[in-house]
Image (cartoon, rainbow, N blue to C red):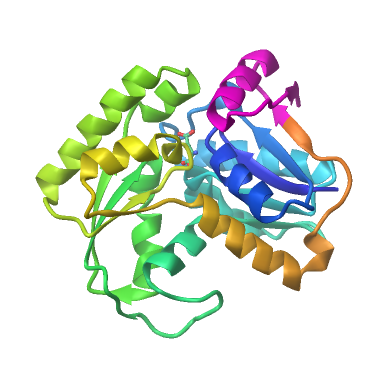
Amino acid sequence: MAVGIFDSGLGGLTVLDAAQRRLPDVDFLYYGDNDRAPYGVRDAEDVFQLTNTAVHNMWDMGCNLVILACNTASAAALRRMQEAGVPEGKRVLGVFVPLIEALTERHWGDNSPPREVEVKNVALFATPATVASRAFQRELAFRAIGVDVEAQACGGLVDAIEDGDMILAEALVKSHVDALLRKLPSPQAAILGCTHYPLMQDIFQAALGPDVKVFSQGNLVADSLADYLQRRTDMHGSGAGGYYTTGTPERVSRHATQFLRREVNFQAV
Ligand code: DGL
């Protein structure tokens, strides 16, 4: 048993990396559906079906808890999977809530009514499917009032990162930030609402300028997971973790090694 981290591809490694640093004694099973990435250009039903299948595979592989380290999957599948009921002793959680709690200065489990917060103008960068779902705005509205969110669907960026084409990825970040700044010239904060984007965080920050506070999910999700595992020791897991992909293991391992700057060896699911 190990804690499962799921993404459509390589992006969840940004969450895995932070979780491994925060929880060095926990085993993790990473599962990338690289063969079917990107999810962000698929419709919600398609994303739900793919996510549901992968999470059931991970439960069957021995995980009790699976984190959807993918905003697109969290937006399209999380609530539906939880409402449909999960098998006894199993759990699935997403990545929106820790980020929105940080943005709205809340602690875990603070379900008090929405209130005014310091941040008033937020730039959201996410996949086309996440932007279309409006899931961020919905989660934000439960917790804060008076926050304007301007969303930019970053078409093409996940493909470029999955292909390891960092020159194209950099050009796309700059053009998506330009497009956002034309709609919202002075955001106070920016959300990297796709777990692939922290791999380009320096480029986002440079294009946005030093005054914009950039929020990404790695450390926030890792802290929230540490807190959760303290309360739910039955979700802790032990034993074999590892790196699994539906794509070509050699290719995925090469790109993952490049991103994490340490050797990572994927095997076929
Ligand atoms: N990392 C996924 C996310 O956080 C990328 C989705 C995709 O495959 O397009 O949304």
Q: Quadrant of residue 146?
A: bottom left
> Which of the pair 187/21 is nearer the observer?
21
- Residue at image position (47%, 17%) is 163
Residue 88 on image: x %, y %? 82, 61
Horizontal side of residue 63 vs 103, given as left or right: right
- Residue at image position (26%, 68%) is 119
Q: Look at the image and tell me in which quarter the C terminus lies.
A: top right
- Residue at image position (23%, 50%) is 210
Residue range (magenta): 244-269
Q: Is residue 127 magenta?
A: no
Horizontal side of residue 187 vs 234, given as left or right: left
Residue 205 on image: x %, y %? 29, 43
Q: Is residue 266 magenta?
A: yes
Q: Eyeballing the image, is 249 above or below 222? A: above
Horizontal side of residue 105 vs 82, given as left or right: left
Q: Eyeballing the image, is 200 above or below 186? A: above
- Residue at image position (89%, 45%) is 239
Q: Quadrant of residue 100?
A: bottom left
Residue 32 on image: x %, y %? 63, 32
Total of numbered circles in the picture? 0
Residue farthest along the right direction in this orientation: 239
Residue 122 in view, yes or no: yes
Residue 83 in view, yes or no: no
Q: Eyeballing the image, is 114 above or below 163? A: below
Residue 45 on image: x %, y %? 51, 41
